Image: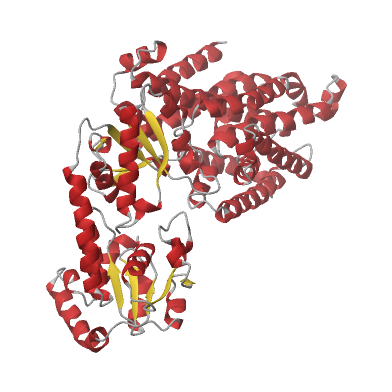
Amino acid sequence: MKVALILIALCAGLFTLSLVTGFTPVSAQHSLAALLRDDGTPLTVVMREIRLPRALLAVMIGASLGLAGAAMQGYLRNPLAEPGLIGVSAAAGLGAVLTLQTGVAAAFALALPLGALTSALLAVGLILALAGPRGSSLTLILAGIAVSALASALTSLVLNLSPNPFAAAEIVFWMLGSLADRSFNHVWIALPFMALGWVLLAGLGRGLDALTLGEDAAAALGINLNRLRLALVIGTAASVGAATAVAGAIGFVGLVVPHVLRRFVGARPSALLWASALGGAAMVLAADIAVRLLLPDRDLKLGVLMALVGAPLFLHLIYKTRAEFR
Amino acid sequence: MAPRIAPRILVSVPISNHIKHSARALVCALTLQLMLLPGIARAQERVVSINLCTDQLALMLAAPGQLASVSRLAHDPDSSAMVAQARALPTNGSGAEEVFLLRPDLVLAGTYTDPATVSMLRSLGIPVELFAPATAISDVPKRMAQMGRALNRSAQADQMIAQFNAAIARLEGDQASPRPRAALSYVNSYSSGPGSLAGDILRLAGFDNVAAEAGLQNVGKIPLETLVMLHPDVIILGRNYPGTARAEDNLSHPALAALNGTVIAPELTDKDWICGTPVVLNAINAMRDLRLRLENS
């Protein structure tokens, strides 16, 4: 309970900080007042149409990535399972790019998250089929490398084939992710899919707890493993797919957050689910504030900061689990 | 990137206004000029242009049959203001190999043309005349004069310059007030300040440029938040390219539509704005019409 309160307070604090961080040199008090009350000035427009959707997306995306990471790690009982590392984000990005570049997304806005979801679904399904129920680290990571490489290459190909002269420069965005100048349009198209994903993943708690005793014990406790797997696959694809569709692939959130929070929730997968959702939101909010403070006018990609934090941890985890590779 | 090294490459141009860079460059250029003098002296009979802007200047000034080929972009109706005239000529892809095989006795290129292409062509013995992009209306007559000299068509160039200068003088004398505050907004939140060709177009059309208030002199970014806070009377959006790119999302961001009292003028910056040719007069007139429409609405 204490952990929950701390995480919620952290998210609320970072959310407010995110709202008052921007190019416009206006006092925090002044800008928050303009957010709450429409004073007819452009500052209200800045707060309501630029900063509010950005902060909301950071929360939604962080929660999705944290939750999906915790759920996958709980299911595979492997701390290396993370949507970015195993190629789900890259695949979602490919799906999103395909709907954008074929013009389907322009004709029908929900096609964008749907395309990302479908592509992410294929990737999660493929990874789980390859890794098997126990999810050996080696298979998981190798399959992830292969899926990521293929999806990234196809994303680059599609963007290079685009008639738009600026499309190819977008490869960076799809690989590293950014929340710069997103709007409420993106909030609304992502929210339904994320909400579906959250409901499915949050419902996995009891099953994942039972699974810590092994498949047979879980089955004996009345857990339907097929249904659990299905909910995990669809929940991850929906939440990570929607997140990637609007903000690109933001890696390492689902790796770092459950790892840090595991000890605080007694390593119970069910508790780790909500804790990682809150922790993920806090981490993406913090990173999005940092990119704006470090290089205000350069649109530094979120993935850069995430990798700076996440990659050393990833190496550390590989070092710790290396016995398994032999 | 290319622009940084371009001036260094420039020093070998046998054209007097480019050789001021250093004493060493001067000596080098003079030597080259002496070497190339026989080639320069005779009329250029087979000229190939490999840059969109030199394409158009050459199309305006070249004698019939003098221009042998234009760059591929010259045939693109979204980029080229002279597609009809350009279609009469074959295009080239601006690569050294392709251009060399056209056997030109003069190549017209921009100072932003890949320096590798330029130096390759020069080392193959083909004179290359480089044109700097226009960054002000006052550059336009200079480029026309340079093209006139390069093509041995100075008389035609002088006539065109006189017409252009007269048109600009009329516009300068016709400045009215109030001057609406306008912002140019292109893909990736780029904008043009007063010290640019687009800035001059805006000024002559009777607008004040808010980019100056944001401290932007030439071309650079105005973040979306800053643009909204500047609260311009009119935001002129850059052209829409085919296909989609996230770079264009700033043009359709709901924050712009939510601004009270700001008019969004879509897609007014197009092919007429790119090159320093007399075509910029079309851009000025289109912007002037926009200002008059705003006044009457």
Determine the residue positioned at 23% across, 59% down.
Answer: B163
Position of A315 with respect to A51 (left or right) is right
Residue B254, placed above or below residue B23? above
Q: Residue at x 54, y 43 (%)?
A: A174
Q: Position of residue A118 (x, y in %)?
A: 71, 38
Q: Is residue A41 left or right of residue B11?
A: right
Q: Position of residue A248 (x, y in %)?
A: 55, 39
Task: Kindly give the residue lying farthest to the left in the view shown.
Answer: B23
The residue under the point 76% across, 39% down is: A125
Residue in the image at 55% along x and 21% along y? A278
Find residue A24 and report its horizontal and vertical position in percent. Answer: 31, 27
Which one is in front, A296 or B149?
A: B149
Note whether residue B120 is visible.
yes
Q: List x then y, in percent, for residue A303.
A: 49, 40
Which quadrant of the view contains residue B8? bottom left
In what quadrant of the picture does the N terminus of chain A appear?
top right
A139 lies above or below B256: below
User: Residue A83: in sight, yes or no?
Assistant: no
State the residue in front, A270 or B260: B260
